[in-house]
Amino acid sequence: MTAEASPLRTPPVRSDNVGLWQFKWNGGSGRGPKASRIKGVQVIDVRPSRRMRDLGVVHAGILAEPTRVFDLPAGREETERIVDELFAAIERIGQVHPFAKGKGMGIAAPWIGIARSAAIVLPADDAPVVILLDPRITDHSEETDEQYEGCLSFFDVRGLIPRPPKITVDATALTGETTTTGYERGLARLSHHEIDHPDGLLHTARMLPEVDPIPVEEYRQTGRARAYE
């Protein structure tokens, strides 16, 4: 079986458990893993959040804690190591969840258990990868728009989040210099989401009081992908 040839939302992963083949994937139904046995084959349906935990994405604790900034350029070697770990994590996630590729995604250091102020963002188009070290939003547009967002730590649900479509971000370069960059539309939203994590702020905290998260299956049925005028 391959991800391209099957209707599964994630590629099947096979393991041999004492002569019993196990296949795991996300089928998008139920609240937890489901298993059945057919002629010596055990099939397990794994929820998206469970799959993220298996890939090393944390779901509590460090996510609610502020992170430490970098000491650059003195700490350049450690900083580059952490950035490499973030890229490795995105590669792992992209292999298991190919739908994330090409649609824009990001990851912050707290997601993989590192309490440092770092994140990377992969834009939805072919634009260069954004590396954010010690990022700070210094300006933003007054208006906001609402779009659904997901989070690797809460992958079973999606939330409707208001964010400004334009932001200005100060970050630290590996040389220790401060850079100032403006982001708009989808890239502004992705960057804003990731910048929240080093501050210990989850996207659910930005939801309006009258709005509740919806299951990812319901989100897919809405047909409401991110759209900007």
Image (spheres, grey):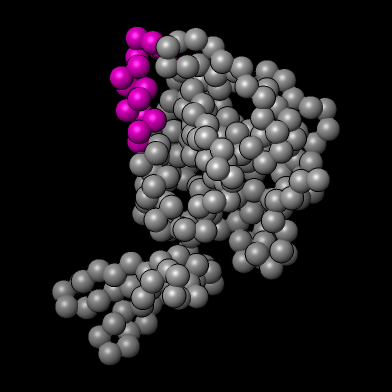
Task: Name the residue nearer the viewer: 23 or 18.
Answer: 23
**Occupied quadrant, residue 78:** top left
Which of the image's four quarters has the C terminus?
A: top right
Which of the image's four quarters has the N terminus?
A: bottom left
- Residue at (29%, 70%) from the top-left corner? 14
- Residue at (41%, 58%) from the top-left corner? 96
Above-or-below relation of 64 to 38: above
Residue 63 appears left or right of 211? left
Work out which residue is located at the far front of the displayed protein and give it: 126
Above-or-below relation of 137 to 20: above
Q: Is residue 71 magenta?
A: yes
Q: Main secondary structure of the magenta part?
A: helix
Q: Is residue 225 magenta?
A: no
Percent across and percent down for residue 108 are 48, 35
Observer able to see residue 227: yes
Residue 41 appears left or right of 162? left
Segment tinted magenta in the rendering = 70-85
Percent across and percent down for residue 171 are 55, 19
- Residue at (16%, 74%) from the top-left corner? 18
**Occupied quadrant, residue 144:** top right
How many numbered marks, from 0 up? Answer: 0
Above-or-below relation of 222 to 209: below
